[in-house]
Image (tube, rainbow, N blue to C red):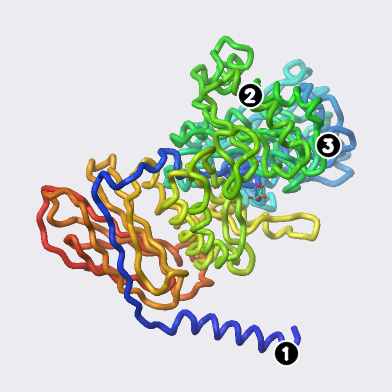
């Protein structure tokens, strides 16, 4: 770096730091009309999540499968095929490994052939640990002492087999768990399914799965899986990552993409019918936008199951006959339309219907609650989109009149030229721009389809890998969306997850998306400040938006909203004021409540939740996961007027218990 740019960077740093440090105090007033008649309902579906298979969010993330490329298909259907990340144990004089097309499964024909040249006796003695293959998982398997792992694989051989199936350290040293699998020649002359449970006697976050032998002969392996037994409800979701989603209490989950749905090429797009049925029969596919292979263990069924487990409505995005580089002509799009209809039938058809019966065979005879579908992703500007969209729209509307159909075309500033129930709105930009967009829906038409803000985030320098600055700008934007919840019916951040190991492989050809709400490796995780901002909004779903007017000189950097909501756990009503101060000044905020129930003399038993940090660039990390997290403290009761202090560069929610019976006097008392 030249000295001039170094000076410039130091200057920027000083300016940035001083922006945080020079603190004046500004007065502001928020008048809240708390009368029930003034409020307007916020949709039940307001706050949700968007899951895309990006950054190894699913494969090597939420989907708990430990083996990567379990069917040896990642190298493509032709042989010789690339078996990465599988690797060979043993030298060429002891073992020869190659791929062939002899698999039992028609949709994934590649199998692994191991020709073992060594033995326990004779001239060519096998090494003591045996020879074979190992799989390191997705940057190391997390194996934990006392936990059980179900290993399943398919095997065939020309003779008898004597295999060791083991979980070991990353270099093959140190057995964490092991089982012997033996079979006579007649047992394994045809493909045979083997299942064994391994219980770990030690912990290693960077373990691998090995299949080894010391017996000469030819063995074929296929569809090798290792699943932790403690997934959420045994549904295959990694428990910690699932917990991060459950904490968000999402009312919907949009899936499975994003660009993942489109593909660079249609042949690499997510197609639901290739991801259902028994896991070992699924072909898997190479997601050529995010450039990695997925075995599709997390398939369409599992996404629907995930939605149900979370208590969230599934929002299925399907391919509209358009990839990044191809467009099917509208005259030829009917097979895609039929595929979408079949997918809807799979989700909600009767258990005796063609596709509903497959769902039932997979263990879910009851229909899933699919009420929303999106036709394509970010395809509005494509020449064939409208034509294709209308084909999907009329077919779905006539077969399933209750399903809400989401268009890719933005109607926030002009009416749509086609029918839709909702329209998709995506925004990725810098912090100031996103904060300013809080008012974008103030100008949107109050009639016509509603907005689904299904992807938003601050990106670029302001965001780093998940900064406070990005989160505060997003909080301001979300307050604007909440204030416009008569027309904005759904909101979700993007992307949701990143496996931090995936960031290491950035090159000009492979785009890795940054930032992301939840960051993890094989055994650790944290939420970025953007994750925590979202948690301030789940109560908004189904709440009532109160009229609130803010007077301040910081009109471009201070924003607030007020809602009233009923907590189903304690049955109490709360008034929640959320305030974003996107400015270097401290704000003395005077809040007054009008229109309270005449019996409510005071608002009592309340709390404050504050998200801030000493620098706008502060981020959480695996070593400091809680550097920027919300801190909750109790407030003593407050009356119909209250003064609160809002720190510079902060997001605060004040929750006031609105219980007409309670009469207590009040002062703010902060724990922190
Ligand atoms: O969220 C990352 C990507 O951003 C999504 O795949 C796409 O819809 C958008 O361009």
At 86% from the left and 30% from the top, the residue drawn is: 100
User: Where residue 47 sits in the image (x, y, percent)?
Assistant: 45, 45
In the rendered image, which residue does mark 1 sit on? 3
Between marks 3 and 2, how big is the CA–CA gap? Answer: 26 Å
Mark 2 neighbour class, 10 Å CA radius: few under 14, some 14 to 19, many 20 or more: many
The quadrant the N terminus occupies is bottom right
User: Where residue 566 sits in the image (x, y, percent)?
Assistant: 28, 43
* Apparent side of residue 218 relative to residue 21 in the rendered image (left or right): right
In the rendered image, which residue does mark 3 sit on? 76
* Apparent side of residue 217 relative to residue 358 in the rendered image (left or right): right
At 60% from the left and 46% from the top, the residue drawn is: 414
Between marks 3 and 1, how big is the CA–CA gap? Answer: 50 Å
Is any atom of residue 415 visible in this view?
yes
The quadrant the C terminus occupies is bottom left
Helix, strand or loop under label 2: helix
Judged from this view, the residue extending furthest toward the top is: 352
Helix, strand or loop under label 1: helix
* Apparent side of residue 434 relative to residue 221 in the rendered image (left or right): left
- 490 vs 184: above or below: below
| Residues tagged 3 and 1 counted as in contact (Cβ below 8 A) | no
Q: Nearer the viewer, residue 555 or 521?
A: 555
In the rendered image, which residue does mark 2 sit on? 343
Is any atom of residue 133 visible in this view?
no
At 55% from the left and 13% from the top, the residue drawn is: 351
| Residues tagged 3 and 2 counted as in contact (Cβ below 8 A) | no
Say whether disc 3 or disc 1 marks the residue closer to the N-terminus: 1
Helix, strand or loop under label 3: loop
Say whether disc 3 or disc 2 marks the residue closer to the N-terminus: 3
- 120 vs 477: above or below: above
Say whether disc 2 or disc 1 marks the residue closer to the N-terminus: 1
């Amino acid at each position: 770096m030249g000295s001039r740019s170094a000076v410039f960077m130091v200057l920027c740093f000083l300016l940035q730091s001083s922006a945080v440090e020079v603190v004046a105090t500004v007065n502001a007033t928020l008048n809240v009309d708390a009368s029930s008649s003034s409020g307007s309902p916020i949709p039940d579906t307001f706050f949700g999540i968007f899951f895309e298979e990006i950054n190894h969010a699913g494969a090597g993330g939420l989907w708990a499968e430990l083996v990567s490329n379990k069917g040896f298909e990642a190298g493509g259907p032709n042989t010789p095929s690339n078996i990465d990340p599988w690797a060979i144990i043993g030298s060429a004089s002891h073992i020869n490994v190659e791929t062939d097309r002899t698999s039992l499964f028609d949709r994934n024909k590649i199998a692994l052939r191991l020709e073992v040249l060594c033995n326990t006796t004779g001239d060519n003695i096998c090494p003591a640990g045996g020879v074979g293959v190992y799989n390191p998982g997705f940057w190391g398997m997390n194996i934990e002492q006392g936990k059980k792992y179900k290993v399943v694989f398919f095997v065939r051989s020309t003779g008898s087999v004597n295999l060791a199936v083991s979980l070991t350290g990353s270099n093959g040293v140190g057995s964490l768990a092991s089982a012997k699998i033996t079979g006579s020649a007649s047992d394994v002359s045809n493909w045979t399914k083997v299942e064994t449970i391994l219980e770990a006697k030690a912990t290693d976050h960077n373990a691998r799965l090995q299949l080894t032998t010391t017996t000469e002969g030819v063995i074929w392996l296929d569809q090798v899986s290792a699943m932790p037994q403690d997934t959420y409800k045994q549904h295959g979701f990694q428990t910690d990552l699932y917990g991060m989603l459950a904490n968000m209490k999402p009312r919907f989950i949009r899936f499975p993409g994003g660009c993942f749905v489109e593909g660079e090429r249609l042949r690499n797009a997510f197609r639901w019918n290739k991801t259902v049925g028994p896991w070992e029969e699924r072909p898997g596919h190479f997601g050529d936008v995010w450039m990695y292979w997925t075995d599709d263990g997390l398939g369409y069924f599992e996404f629907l199951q995930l939605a149900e487990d979370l208590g969230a409505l599934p929002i299925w995005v399907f391919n509209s006959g358009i990839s990044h580089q191809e467009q099917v002509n509208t005259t030829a799009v009917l097979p895609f339309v039929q595929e979408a209809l079949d997918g809807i039938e799979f989700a909600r058809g009767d258990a005796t219907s063609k596709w509903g019966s497959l769902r039932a065979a997979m263990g879910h005879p009851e229909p899933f609650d699919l009420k929303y579908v999106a036709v394509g992703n970010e395809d509005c500007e494509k020449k064939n989109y409208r034509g294709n969209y209308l084909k999907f729209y009329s077919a779905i509307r006539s077969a399933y009149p209750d399903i809400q159909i989401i268009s890719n075309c933005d109607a926030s500033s002009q009416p749509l030229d086609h029918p839709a129930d909702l329209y998709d709105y995506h925004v990725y930009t810098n912090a100031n721009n996103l904060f300013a967009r809080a008012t974008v829906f103030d100008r949107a038409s109050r009639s016509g389809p509603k907005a689904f803000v299904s992807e938003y985030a601050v990106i670029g320098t302001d965001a780093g890998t998940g900064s406070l600055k990005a989160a505060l700008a997003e909080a301001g934007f979300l307050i604007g969306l909440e204030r416009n919840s008569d027309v904005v019916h759904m909101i979700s951040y993007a992307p949701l997850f990143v496996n931090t190991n995936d960031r290491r492989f950035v090159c000009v050809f492979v785009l890795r998306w940054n930032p992301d709400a939840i960051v993890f490796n094989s055994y650790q995780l944290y939420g970025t400040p953007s994750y925590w901002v979202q948690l301030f909004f789940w109560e908004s779903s189904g709440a009532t938006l109160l009229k609130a007017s803010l007077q301040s000189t910081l009109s471009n950097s201070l924003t607030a909203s007020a809602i009233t909501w009923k907590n189903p756990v304690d049955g109490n009503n709360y008034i929640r004021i959320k305030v974003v101060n996107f400015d270097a000044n401290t704000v003395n905020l005077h809040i007054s409540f009008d229109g309270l129930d005449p019996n409510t003399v005071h608002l009592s038993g309340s709390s404050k939740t504050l998200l801030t940090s000493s620098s706008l660039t502060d981020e959480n990390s695996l070593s400091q996961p809680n550097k920027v997290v919300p801190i909750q403290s109790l407030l003593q009761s407050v009356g119909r007027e209250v003064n609160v202090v809002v720190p510079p560069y902060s997001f605060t929610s004040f929750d006031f218990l609105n219980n007409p019976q309670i009469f207590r006097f009040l002062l703010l008392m902060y724990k922190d």
